[in-house]
Image: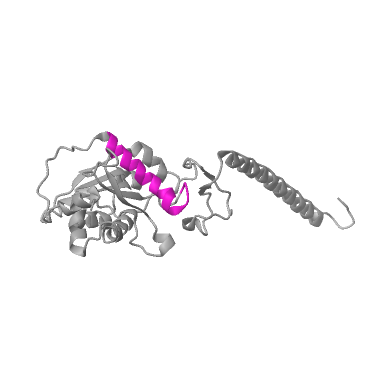
Amino acid sequence: MHLNPTYLALFSIPWFVHAQDDVDTVPVESRNHWMRRSVDALAELTGSPCPFEAFGSAIVNHSDTTNSEHGELICIGANSIIQNGNPTLHGEIAAINNCSRILTSEPYNLVGREALGAFQGLSLYTTAEACPMCATAIRWAGFKDYVYATSLDTLVKQSWPQISLSSSQIFEKASSLPTKTRMVPHVLADETDPLFAWQFNENGKCPPGCRRSRIGEKTNNPAAVGDTKRTCVPGDKGDEDGLAGELADEAVAGAAKGLRGLWTALFNLFKVAAPVGDEL
């Protein structure tokens, strides 16, 4: 019986990973490849080219190059806290949950303990630096690598609400754990930073395939429900230009209406103030 090399590689992983060399042996091209796959996971799992919570993840086995020189994809995940009403379903947690289901199903069929051990040979990629909850989960899982793009500092500068504990600080507190996880920061941050730059800035550029909505326009973005600001929604940039023209027309019409109201008020004021018998 032929066994998938990924399956064999997972079974060959020791329960505890020894301290690894600090030199990152994974080629830059492979790091970039999987970070872009994490970005692609957003549209794939959310159905939108511009999800509000643009936190996507991919978990990879770099030791299996049977199908690709970059390694083998095990699972993906995307932030789905709004869709599922679960505040813990950040992109990294969603990916870990998906991998647990996959590793304990066909073709791997690992038992729980084996699946836990398998994480120690896998690498987790995520579009932004993990929050303290996710960084802690990454260390408890014992991932071989943790690779992120956009930094916590950048998220804070872009007005994202964050708990101000960096991954480095979390990892420092995890030194007593029996595994070691290599952290690889800022991979393709120049490509992911724009994904987080529009949510709290109406002047931020929408991701490709998206445009700015009109105020009050019904959107499929659950995070924008009840929002009075213009969010990014799927659509053509030409539509956005058209909407901008409509907004300008509405502004002119509103100003004209306001002037008419002012003249009416002044007319009535003078009429009331005029002496009896006089007419304006």
Spot occupied by residue 222 in the image (x, y as percentages of width and height): 48, 58
Residue at position x 46%, y 42% from top? Answer: 207
Spot occupied by residue 236 in the image (x, y as percentages of width and height): 56, 41
User: Does 34 lie within the magenta span?
Assistant: yes
Main secondary-structure element of the magenta-colored stretch: helix
22 on left or right of 32: left
Spot occupied by residue 167 in the image (x, y as percentages of width and height): 23, 49
Residue at position x 43%, y 61% from top? Answer: 83
Asked whether 138 or 277 is in front, the reply is 138
User: Does 1 lie within the magenta span?
Assistant: no
Place residue 177 in its image quadrant: bottom left
28 on left or right of 231: left
Would you say residue 206 is visible in this rendering? yes
Place residue 112 in its image quadrant: bottom left
Place residue 157 in its image quadrant: top left
Farthest-out residue, right: 277
Residue at position x 28%, y 45% from top? Answer: 72
219 on left or right of 195: right
